[in-house]
Amino acid sequence: MTDNPMPNILEGHTVPGSLLEKQVHVTVVGCGGTGTAFVSGLPLLHQAMLALGHPDGLDVSLVDGDRISSTNCVRQPFCENEIGLFKSIVLATRINLFYGLGWRAYPRFIDESWRDETDILVSCVDTRKARKMLMRTAAYHACHYWLDIGNNAATGQFVLGQPDNHRNSKCPSRLPTVAELFPEIVDPELDRRDSLPSCSAVEALTRQEPFINQSLANLALAMLARLFRHGRLSYHAAFVNLAGGLTAPISVSPDVWKRMMEASERSAISGRRSPKTRNGRRFKKRRSRQSVKQPA
């Protein structure tokens, strides 16, 4: 599956060899704005992996108990004829019919009773409570990776981490998860401070950049594509700012992680607690330490 990486690029994280030798099970939790954008790109990643020599590509499960509303038909790829149907079922059916796949949909909200194991757990949820619940599942405690994607009006972040579980206990340099870099992102008490999303389609469009979800999803997909094509990564997360058209990656570096965790701890103490509301400030600070690239 892997080919020779481009020269002069330091790659700091290596994919577990088992994921290059078997079908990779991906569980996507949340089929809203970001979830639908991310899921829509997974068949292309699956086909690319097969074309580049991966033996079986991806096997995907979609988990969401939400039903399609009229508001969803404005910002998400659903139509009026689908109002009232489960998002997860509509997406899985659409993908299976078009690509000839057998991916599964689970029209339910995830909780501690979720026992299905997975290789890559993807959270596209809009509350800290949902992230906290995800961390209590058997899937979290047995997965290789947890990819979290979150956003505010014009900014957002995606973080690929390796939960501290039995699968990753022997990793020489385990990738920290979003909960380790930003502990406040799994604090349910802070959900009351968040004002997104809106139940009004017009209000949602005026309060949130129309393509923030797609931008984050595509960059996260590109990162996974690189992981499976080259077998390694030099970065595992990034901040995105559509207002400035900028992207700031987070390098695979224990020194960088230490500084970020220390900054999060100081922010919590000083009262600046939410990564979603402080993305602009953090983004500006990181520009002086890392190269800033235009988003894809």
Image (cartoon, grey):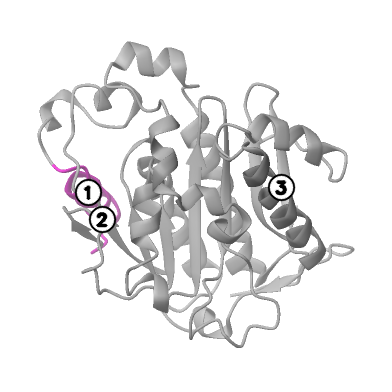
Whichever of labels 2 and 3 marks the residue nearer the N terminus, that label is 2
Q: Is residue 140 above or below residue 100?
A: below
Q: Is residue 151 left or right of residue 242?
A: left
Task: Count the labels in the image.
Answer: 3
Q: Give the residue at mark 1.
A: 88
Q: Is residue 130 above or below residue 196?
A: below
**In the foreground, 93 or 66:** 66
Q: Is residue 114 left or right of residue 150?
A: left
Q: Give the residue at mark 3.
A: 266
Residue 154 is situated, as x and y percent measured from the top left of the image, at 56, 25
Q: Gap between marks 1 and 3, in whole Å? A: 39 Å
- Callout in the foreground (2, 3): 3
Element under disc 1: helix
Magenta region, main secondary structure: helix
Q: State the extent of the magenta-drawn residues as a range.
A: 86-102
Q: Is residue 34 above or below residue 146?
A: above
Characterize the local packing of mark 2: few (<14), some (14-19) or many (20 or more) Cα atoms within 10 angstroms. Answer: many
Residue type marked 2: Val
Residue type marked 3: Arg
| Res 230 → quadrant | bottom right
Q: Tag on residue 63?
A: 2
